[in-house]
Amino acid sequence: MKSNRLVTQYQRDNGEAGYKMTTFEIDVIAKSTGGLAPTILYFHDNQDVTDDIRSLRFGVDSPFTFIDDYGQFQTMLYKKEQQALNNLYDTISIRPKNMSTPKQILWSFGVLLLMTIPLLVAIILR
């Protein structure tokens, strides 16, 4: 296996070499860089470990076959990625955040109505 800062080798009870994740303390940040899809960055102890995670995920061999706790790591990472994406979308959304669900629905219809007024005026004045 190639060297990866997130994976350590250890000795199993039967004497074979095994691999496990070094840490589960990964910070995930989603950024919008102007494209359609956001960019997701991974940090551990203020160091960028994005390339290490990508090399695990997109390597030739599946990490599930040789890293013992990779399933737990992947589950944790997925939850943090979803939270980072939700935080990003909340910062760029025009949706009001401190309203109840019925008020948000009414607000959405109000915005839709405001957006269609110029179209209705153009049709009537035609």
Image (cartoon, rainbow, N blue to C red):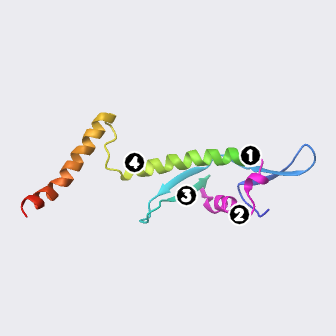
Kind of residue at disc 3: Leu
Q: Quadrant of the N terminus?
A: bottom right
Could you tell me which secondary element the residue under label 3 belongs to? strand
> What range is drawn magenta here?
47-68
The disc, 4 or 3, on the residue closer to the chain's N-terminal end is: 3
The disc, 3 or 1, on the residue closer to the chain's N-terminal end is: 3
Residue at the spot 48% in from the left edge and 51% down from the top edge: 85
Front: mark 4 or 2: 2
Q: Quadrant of the C terminus?
A: bottom left
Front: mark 3 or 1: 1
Kind of residue at disc 1: Asp
Numbered label attached to residue 90 = 4
Kind of residue at disc 2: Gly
Q: Nearer the viewer, residue 81 or 106?
A: 106
Q: Is residue 49 visible?
A: yes
**Residue bearing the label numbered 1:** 69
The disc, 3 or 2, on the residue closer to the chain's N-terminal end is: 3
Could you tell me which secondary element the residue under label 4 belongs to? helix
Left or right: 70, with 105 as reference point:
right
